Image: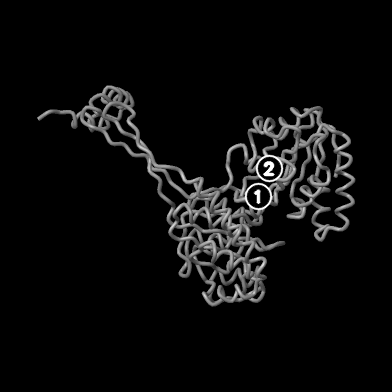
Amino acid sequence: MEIIKYNKKNDKEIIERSQNDVKDILPIVNEILNNVKLNGDSAIKKYGEEFDKVTLTDFKVSQKEIEESYNNIDEKLLKAIKKAISNIEKFHRLQLPEEWCKEINDGVMAGLIVRPIENVGCYIPGGRAIYPSTVLMTIIPAKIAGVSRIICCSPPNSKGKINDAILVAADLAGANEIYKIGGAQAIGAMAYGTRTIEKVDKIVGPGNIFVTGAKKLVYGEVDIEFEAGPSEVLIIADNSANSEYISYDILSQAEHDPNASCYLLTHDKSLAVDVEKKISKITENAKRKDIIKESLSKYGKIILTNDLKESIDLSNKYAPEHLIITTNNNEEVLKEIKNAGSIFLGEYSPVAAGDYGSGTNHVLPTGTGGRIYSGLSTESFLKKPTIQKITYDGLKDLSETIIPIAEYEGLYAHADSVKIRLKKE
């Protein structure tokens, strides 16, 4: 990893990271989506043969396939999935908002009610790695929110099968339907519907550049959570930090993808040098070292700042997907953090905990999205219609507000709708 001395003039260079720049592939994605919209299942079959190298006549995973998948996974893995489900459920139940109605003025009651989205589609990627954890992170909050129909789409292998752990996780988490479809065509199927697949109202879940492009194009036809690019970690550390822990935190993100971004911000030069040496040594024995090396050579940086405040300020500009804080006073640093997807405090809080077991969600905004978005949550699957209940006297009092403004705007029927109610027989 490159060690860079920070100064405010090289802000732009320092915070550069990989993004799924979808502009170049949007015409291809648009063609796929239009074909799916017009030709439905036949288009899905065509793209399955072209991209997944498999011919399928039935895209839906059968109950028999789900039952068989339980026999094909290790008992230790099954136990881990069940424990992860328990923690994710506990955390996401705490996110459920309460309905309320309050008296805003005499005779004027106003509030909001909470209702779930009815149909949700979860995209589960299947590229360089298999992600049963993403199954749990997308389905469980939707289930807790009360979504009545949750479907999953994931690309099949050359034998027309979805990974066993994916099927088990989806079944245990509460998916209603699972389909063997990947890529932009899966997004099109969920957004527009086909003879086999009923359309959904919202699509969530990460994917490759074609999936990201497809979600961008179908937004408006359906809702999406946000555009997610390659994974990111940023670490704020001082002389109290454990260099070995930091090194493994960086490698754990770099192994995701050749375009993953991994940053260490520290004002301690000896820590910076120590981490750089350890990463070079550990990488040589890493199982995914080719991916790690490519990632760190492109988007791996150790930034030497002047002080802790400068590290915090730069982190807020960067708005990382994952932020690790390992300093002498983590709680005080946390107070100054404005932008991040998910935050990990202290040396015993690796990103892997949030990825798999602590209960928080790992579907998070990237590419400075943390400035404006939160990660996937129970509330991502909820709507909050407002309500009002007004008495005659309450409306009479409000009329002095409503009528002048409505008439000034030229909306005279608005004003009349109040006047007619106040007119005595």
What residue did someone put label 2 on?
344
Q: Is residue 410 left or right of residue 378?
A: left
Three-letter residue code for mark 2: Phe
| Mark identifier at residue 185 | none
Give the position of the N terminus as an image quadrant. top right
Element at label 1: helix
In the rendered image, which quarter is residue 66 located in?
A: bottom right
Looking at the picture, how far across and down is residue 103, in whole percent? 32, 30
Quadrant showing the C terminus: top left
Q: Secondary structure at mark 2?
A: strand
Q: What is the crowding at mark 2: few (fewer than 14 residues within 10 Å), some, or many (at least 20)?
A: many
Q: Position of residue 28 (x, y in %)?
A: 62, 58
Mark 2–mark 1 contact, CB under 8 Å? Answer: yes
Sequence-first disc among 2 and 1: 2
Q: Badge 1 is on which residue?
A: 354
- Residue found 88% across the figure and 47% down from its top: 278
Amino acid carrying label 1: it is: Gly
- How far apart are labels 2 and 1 at the CA level? 8 Å
